Image: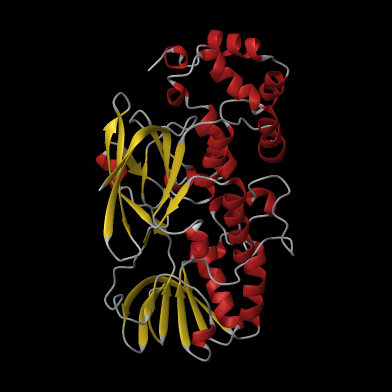
Amino acid sequence: MSTATDTLDFLIIGAGPAGLSAADAAAREGLSYLVIEKGTIANTIRQYPVGRTMFSTPNELEMREGSLQPIREKPTREELLSHYIHFVLDHDLHITTGEEVIDVAGNYEDGFTVRTRCRSFDGKQNENNYHARSILFAIGAMEYPRHLDVPGEDLPKVYHRFVDPYPYVRKEVMVVGGGNSAAEAALFLSEEGARTTMAIWREDWENRDPKAGAMKHWVRSPLEKEIAEGRLRVILYKQIDEVTYDSVRLTTDEGESKTIPNDVVFVLVGSDADLTLLKKLGVKTELGKLTEVPVYDTETCETNVRGIYVAAPCASRAYRDKRRVALEFLLNKESLYGSIDCRRYCWLRSHVHPELSRVRDSICGHRTYSGFSAGSVSRFEQMDRDQLCDHFHHRNYRRSNLCGNR
């Protein structure tokens, strides 16, 4: 076992877009940091279907304004992966991959110890210890695919992840799920020659409200075309009753029992984050819309455990822009700067005025962002370093943390 002797300002668990953005912001502010990723850079995106077009536009995904320039309106999986990987290489971000965090212990006052496990080139398993003042869990919410918990779901023909449609040409395929991933998988399969049935709840099929999780119109439109041309069948179901070697038995939303001939099943009903380490640290959780989520401060992303933060996807927040995660973590985390005086802290805010302006203009509009309105951000841009310090000092933004020393 090896142990790092230096204590990091903060450690980031997860090298997805949120983790990379936080690392980039830390590097620009001269903080000591490390990103630990058990898979690869942007590992969740790497597991998307081959050739998949992203749902978001470049300005919602890019690491720098104008840096992601896809061939079409929206980037593909491959274009986005390349963008993130080259960003890491070009900026020499401190990231270790293939290293799994297996334990986190400690507290804010004494510091946290992070224990990891990785496999060396000779096949030996090694463990490492890292020390950090604060930790950001940017682990996403894709660790555990949700199951139907029905008989036969453990058969080898049942998958909880869709990669590509080509092994299933002229096969009887069922896709279970009502989100964009399920709809997109059904579309790809149907277009590429699989005899596809999509089993979806009526409320999901009839949902047209994007704010309520409706499937994207650019997925629904070609999906409905496949249905109209007879290549895709949609069944509005109440529950899946059983999966067998050659069929799926289900109950429709009208109460009718149906047995559908079947060669392969894709159960794409969402996934959950691994909250094991957070709960071990004492982080409180609550029941979200579909699953358990950590409780956190909506302004700072800090949990009830001081020094432990969660990025938006892990917290299952509706608004998941990676730039907001990085800015909130580095600019609203007074406790992270416990050893930095008030004037230095306020200078950090003034140093990123261009970024605040860009976030205000491209993301926030007139909504409140990280506790600041668009107007207040403009007012901050006009302040010099001392004025900023006085402003935050008199506004009492956690004054004891802001000005205290560790």
Please provide percent x and percent y for residue 319. Answer: 55, 43
Taking depth in this image into account, of 250 and 276 the one nearest to the observer is 276
Residue lying at the far front of the rendered structure: 122
163 sits left or right of 82 in the view: left
240 sits left or right of 14 in the view: left
Please provide percent x and percent y for residue 306. Answer: 35, 28
223 sits left or right of 11 in the view: right
Question: What coloring was used for the rendering?
Answer: secondary structure
Q: Residue at x 47, y 33 (%)?
A: 298
Q: Residue at x 43, y 51 (%)?
A: 96
Q: Quadrant of the C terminus?
A: top left
Establish if 276 lies above or below 264.
above
**Residue 262 makes an appearance in the image:** no
Establish if 142 lies above or below 387.
below
Taking depth in this image into account, of 289 and 112 the one nearest to the observer is 112
Residue lying at the far bottom of the rendered structure: 170
Q: Residue at x 36, y 62 (%)?
A: 146
Please provide percent x and percent y for residue 356. Answer: 66, 31
Please provide percent x and percent y for residue 143. Answer: 38, 58
Establish if 175 lies above or below 123.
below
Residue 110's image quarter? top left
Taking depth in this image into account, of 281 and 124 the one nearest to the observer is 124
Establish if 86 lies above or below 340.
below
Q: Residue at x 70, y 31 (%)?
A: 354
**Residue 171 makes an appearance in the image:** yes
- Looking at the rendered structure, the number of numbered marks drawn on it comes to 0
Taking depth in this image into account, of 103 and 153 the one nearest to the observer is 103
